[in-house]
Image (tube, coloured by chain):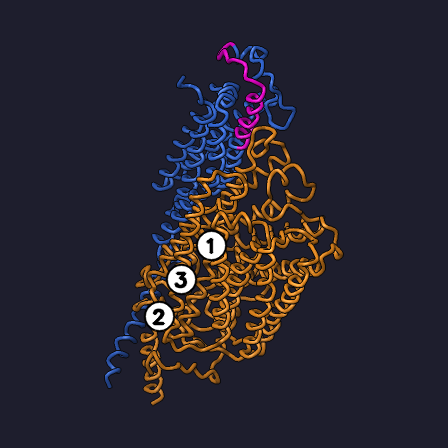
């Protein structure tokens, strides 16, 4: 069988779940809560992340319900402020930032590089506990009245004027930030020091490259927002004057420090998703990723450029025109590595043997939606259009296209793709394909009208709006309902599949990564023998030879 | 069959790998964690992780240094007047104390590497005491600021800056001209940064001293003198980093106008 025919997936009727795997090795709650195993920690993260995602999602539902009508009828305006603030805080710091890295990255990076675990298992567990501590603080904040500054903690609003729970929210973000730093640090050390023999940098799966780039951002950018939050807290409690204009401080400095993290943070969120897309697209078109080296370096380029564009969030905040000019130019530059990725994925599809399993459907969704999200980013990087569009629904639509349309699609693609590896069982294919389509339709219906609303001038962060905007808002709310169904379905059928799913076998997708060459679910040490990498990444010819060899071995031993 | 020669060496290779993975198993030192192949790899990885962590610390303090840089350029006279309120004698003493503690820490690392248990306990204890000494002196300095109402947001008083003569001790030494009210107001930014920067530094000292206490107990039991020295080495890196931060703080906060 050669690489340009449709590959038949292996027969699953004889597959069995191995008795000894990382799930069955030890039992009891404590064996999970005190584990050092990166795979178990990934599952802890997956459960807690899903929980926070649905809280954030419920808040989004409330926002869309309020915006169904032009009047403020569902909740008071300050409640609305709290709802969108908590939606932002929870979705960004407790879902998007850790989503792919802490779950799939945690699970897969050691396996992909042929290691037994991450370099620092205790730090990995610590990062989950910090995440939970931050998350519980955020929930506590919500239960005791919430916070209404917006997720950006804008000073002097956050330091002087609001009387809501800025401090506990700030602490929650601070603590979650350290969880993210430790995850990134662990990944960098692991990728540098734990690779299997023969696993050179340019044999690494692109998933690992993109996580490496994201980890650099986590390690270098997160501490800056940590100190910014500390200063806000000190200003709010003790009244120091670093950001306080009445004392000579400058609120703009807070914006600089905050966006120095929070702009790279969007690349922390999207880069791991891009890694997932590289794996999925290669596997389901049975081709090596086109321009492997360019895709690998584009991840690093995004990380590097990502550090020098933060001030494009501040074009209307009174920074100098020359700064606007420079940051506008640098912002355009980020489009280059992003486009390299999109083009290379598309070229990978060209003449590939494409099949349409669920992960691939989500990946297609990613390609389209991320492209729209990215292109509208160029509108916003251009200072002239930015001044018209900023603080309108155009912005909201733009970053939801990138974060929800891009990142969340990638997360779901990855979750379905590696689900058989994680649990040993397949998800039900038909219903999950349906869920992928529902998500795509619902997403577009929710957020596309918001581009139009934004260009028409509807501002974000208001509970009421002029009646002429209602039709588009009704579309958007209807779309959000469909989107909600699209997200609930996977929860139901994935849980169902834990018990009733077809047993997957080691390599149900015929993928080439090292993680697929071991049993599913994997052993606690991942591999029975230390793997040695003797071929390039995405080498489907190697996989074929390997399987021919195994088959012959079976035949010989049977004979 | 063209494929059969391919299979035979492959099986050999697998057996060889399985052997090499198993054979040194019994010779592992107890501190080698199961997921590392060798103690070298373990030491290498944890050491690299520590350097990365220090990099995050650089970025953490970097935010404060950026703020300092901007405001010092905007409000230079206020920063000069503010720095005159700091006690250079105490500051210098504290710098010496910290450099000494770095020396004792470095000696501690050496003792651990060469297996001198008593020497290690002594060095760590000295570092511990010097660290506490630093915090003690810092407390004296902070209480001076509280007495003179130089704590921002806490009955902050401008009188030392609008009317330097009202503060005879400092005036005798520097003969500062009075600042205009709007510039004098900005001394509060200076003291905000002073407390934020030295406070964050002191917090790092407190964490370091707590870890030192833990290490002294473990070192007495001989935990670090039987070959597993990475923890002491990495803590040493942290301690030196905290010292270096102080040296910058000392120059930037205490010595602003010394060249004039």
Find the distance from the CA under tag 1 to the CA under tag 3.
Answer: 16 Å
Q: Is residue B83 left or right of residue A158?
A: left
Q: Nearer the viewer, residue A450 or B242?
A: A450
The label shown at residue B70 is none
Residue A122 in view of the camera:
no
The residue that label 3 is drawn on is A341
SS state under label 2: loop
Residue at mark 2: A288
Please give the range of residues in magenta.
Answer: B172-196
Name which residue lies at 54% across and 32% down.
B196
Drawing shade for chain B: blue
Q: Is residue A283 visible?
A: yes
Looking at the rendered image, the disc whose residue lies closer to the viewer, 3 or 2, is 3
- Pinpoint residue A110: horizontal percent, then vertical percent: 42, 62
Residue that mark 1 sits on? A378
Above or below, A74 against B118 in this view is below
Q: Nearer the viewer, mark 1 or mark 3?
A: 1
Viewer-nearest residue: B34 or A484: A484
Same subunit, labels 3 and 2: the answer reads yes
- x, y (%) of residue A216? 42, 51
Q: CA distance from mark 2 to mark 1?
A: 30 Å
Chain ID at mark 2? A
Foreground: disc 2 or disc 1: 1
Q: Quadrant of residue A446?
A: bottom right
């Amino acid at each position: 069988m050669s690489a340009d025919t449709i590959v038949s997936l292996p027969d699953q009727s004889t597959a069995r779940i191995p008795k000894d795997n990382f799930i069955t090795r030890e039992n009891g709650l404590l064996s999970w809560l005190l584990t050092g195993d990166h795979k178990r920690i990934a599952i802890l993260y997956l459960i807690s992340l899903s929980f926070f995602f649905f809280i954030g999602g419920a808040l989004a539902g409330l926002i869309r319900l309020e915006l169904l009508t032009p009047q403020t009828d569902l909740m008071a305006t300050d409640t609305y402020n709290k709802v969108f603030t908590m939606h932002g805080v929870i979705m960004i710091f407790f879902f998007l930032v850790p989503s792919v890295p802490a779950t799939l990255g945690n699970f897969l990076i050691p396996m992909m590089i042929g290691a037994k675990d991450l370099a620092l298992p205790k730090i990995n567990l610590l990062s989950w506990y910090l995440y939970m501590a931050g998350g519980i603080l955020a929930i506590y904040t919500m239960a005791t009245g919430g916070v209404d500054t917006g997720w950006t903690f804008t000073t002097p609003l956050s330091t002087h004027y609001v009387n809501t729970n800025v401090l506990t929210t700030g602490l929650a973000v601070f603590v979650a930030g350290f969880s993210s730093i430790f995850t990134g640090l662990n990944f960098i050390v692991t990728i540098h020091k734990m690779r299997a023999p023969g696993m050179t940098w340019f044999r690494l799966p692109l998933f690992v490259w993109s996580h490496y780039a994201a980890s650099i951002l986590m390690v270098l950018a997160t501490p800056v927002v940590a100190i910014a939050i500390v200063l806000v807290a000190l200003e709010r409690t003790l009244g120091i004057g670093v950001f306080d204009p009445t004392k000579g401080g400058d609120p703009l400095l807070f914006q600089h420090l905050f966006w120095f993290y929070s702009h790279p943070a969007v690349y922390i969120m999207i880069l791991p998703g891009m890694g997932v897309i590289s794996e999925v697209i290669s596997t389901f078109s049975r081709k090596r990723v086109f321009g492997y080296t360019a895709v690998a370096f584009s991840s690093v380029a995004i990380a590097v450029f990502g550090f020098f564009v933060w001030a494009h969030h501040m074009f209307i905040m009174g920074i100098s025109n020359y700064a606007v000019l420079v940051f506008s130019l640098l912002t355009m530059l980020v489009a280059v590595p992003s486009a390299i990725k999109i083009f290379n994925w598309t070229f990978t599809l060209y003449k590939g043997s494409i099949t349409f399993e669920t992960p691939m459907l989500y990946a297609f969704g990613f390609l389209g939606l991320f492209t729209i999200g990215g292109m509208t980013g160029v509108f916003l990087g251009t200072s002239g259009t930015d001044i018209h569009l900023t603080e309108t629904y155009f912005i909201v639509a733009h970053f939801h296209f990138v974060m929800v349309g891009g990142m969340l699609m990638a997360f779901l693609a990855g979750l379905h793709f590696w689900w058989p590896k994680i649990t040993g069982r397949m998800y039900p294919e038909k219903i999950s394909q349906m869920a992928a389509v529902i998500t795509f339709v619902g997403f577009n219906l929710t957020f596309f009208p918001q581009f139009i609303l934004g260009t028409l001038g509807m501002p974000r962060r208001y509970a009421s709006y002029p009646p002429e905007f209602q039709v588009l808002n009704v579309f958007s709310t209807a779309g959000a309902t469909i989107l909600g169904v699209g997200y609930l379905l996977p929860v139901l059928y994935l849980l169902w599949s834990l018990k009733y799913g077809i047993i997957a076998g080691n390599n149900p997708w015929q993928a080439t990564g090292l993680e697929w060459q071991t049993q599913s679910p994997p052993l606690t040490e991942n591999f029975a023998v230390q793997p040695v990498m003797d071929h390039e990444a995405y080498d489907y010819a190697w996989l074929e030879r390997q399987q021919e060899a195994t088959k012959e071995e079976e035949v010989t031993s049977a004979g | 069959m063209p494929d059969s020669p391919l299979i035979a060496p492959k099986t050999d290779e697998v057996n060889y790998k399985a052997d090499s993975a198993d054979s040194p198993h019994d010779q592992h030192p107890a501190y080698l964690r199961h997921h590392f192949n060798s103690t070298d790899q373990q030491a290498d990885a944890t050491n690299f992780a520590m350097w990365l962590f220090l990099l995050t610390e650089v970025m953490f303090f970097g935010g404060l240094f950026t703020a300092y840089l901007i405001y010092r350029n905007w409000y230079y006279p206020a920063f000069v007047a503010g720095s005159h309120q700091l006690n250079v004698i105490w500051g210098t003493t504290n710098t010496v104390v910290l450099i000494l503690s770095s020396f004792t820490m470095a000696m501690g690392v050496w003792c651990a590497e060469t297996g001198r248990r008593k020497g290690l306990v002594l060095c760590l204890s000295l570092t511990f005491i010097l660290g506490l000494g630093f915090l003690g002196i810092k407390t004296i300095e902070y209480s001076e600021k509280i007495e003179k109402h130089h704590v921002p947001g806490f009955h902050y008083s401008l009188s030392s800056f609008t009317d330097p003569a009202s503060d005879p001790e400092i005036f005798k030494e520097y003969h500062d001209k009075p600042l205009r009210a709007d510039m004098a107001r900005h001394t509060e930014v200076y003291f905000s940064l002073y407390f934020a920067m030295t406070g964050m530094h002191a917090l790092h000292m407190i964490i370091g001293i707590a870890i030192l206490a833990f290490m002294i107990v473990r070192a007495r039991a001989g935990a670090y003198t039987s070959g597993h020295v990475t923890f002491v080495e990495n803590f040493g890196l942290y301690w030196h980093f905290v010292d270096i931060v102080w040296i910058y703080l000392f120059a930037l906060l205490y010595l602003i106008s010394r060249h004039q």
